[in-house]
Every structure is written in C-alpha cells, then in structure tokens.
Amino acid sequence: MTAYQTVMVGTDGSESSFAAVEGAARLAAVCGAELVVVCAYVPMRGPELVRAQDQLGAEAYQVVGSAPAEDTLQTARDRARAQGAERVRSLAVEEEPVAALARAARECAADLLVVGNRGLRSLAGRLLGSVPADIARKAPVDVLIVHTT
C-alpha cells in the first residue's frame, strides 16, 4: 500500500469536526499529502431567509449563501496548517453532507476521506443514520473515522 496522496476531511464548523480536520491534517503532513477540506451547506431559503435578513439587517450577508461555509473553511484551513499540513485546499459544496463528501472525494481523486465520530453512538444516529456511518457505507474511497467526541 502506498502513502495517501490526497486526504479529504469534512467539517461543519463544530469543535468535533475541527478535531477531525486536525487529525486529517496530521495524517496529511506525515504522508506529504494534499489536504482537501470540504464543508457542505444548504442555503437558507424562503421564510427562514426573510427572518434572518429582517433580524440581521446589514449583517445578513453572514448567513446567506456560502458565507457561513466559507468562514468555517477559513478556520479549518488555519487549524490544518497549525497541525503541519502544507498543501491545504478547501471546497464549499451546496449539497447534503454525505452526498457532498462522496462527490467531492470522486472529483478530487481523494485516497482517503476522514470524518469525526459524532452521531455514531447516539440513539438518533442509530435510528436515523449519521454522517460517519453513511459515509462509511457510501464513500468511493477509504474512510477513517476519527474519535472526536
């Protein structure tokens, strides 16, 4: 088995997902691999968007479109570089998390997809599914589930 060339990690901006980013970054650094950080998002629409714009006024741009995902990705890139990852790229993908990660892994020719374990042990995760469990079943590449909770 050769070293991984492209390591991909998903983040949603939670501390748990940032822990997964840091773990993926350390692995990418050791392998000399590129790290691709992906944040999936579904933009606000309809009444939800109108309420946010009414309440936030001029600051509404912060929650519209990909802005929240871009902020999350900036933080993730900074944390990844702090862990030694040298080549870090990021993608904001408008799609549900599992589909976004699987598609991005194919498009970026990732060798490894890293996700945190949040949701694996919860009752809701067992009944409804969780991102780590669904990714483990659906990803087109190797999957590493990092203990983050």
Image: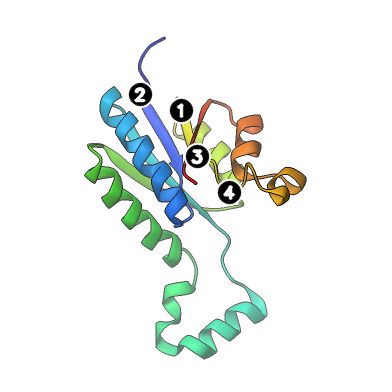
Task: Identify the amino acid type marked 3.
Answer: Val
Separation (CA) of disc 3 from disc 4: 11 Å
| In the image, residue 136 above or below residue 131 | above
Do callouts 4 and 1 mark residues in contact (Cβ within 8 Å)?
Answer: no
User: Tag count in the figure?
Assistant: 4
Separation (CA) of disc 1 from disc 3: 10 Å
Separation (CA) of disc 2 from disc 3: 17 Å
Task: Identify the amino acid type marked 4.
Answer: Pro
The location of residue 139, given as percent across then percent down, is: 59, 31
Separation (CA) of disc 4 from disc 1: 16 Å
Q: Where residue 115 is drawn, which disc sits there?
A: 3
Q: Which residue is mark 4?
A: 97
SS type, badge 3: strand
Separation (CA) of disc 1 from disc 2: 9 Å
* Nearer the observer, 4 or 25: 25
The location of residue 146, given as percent across then percent down, is: 47, 36
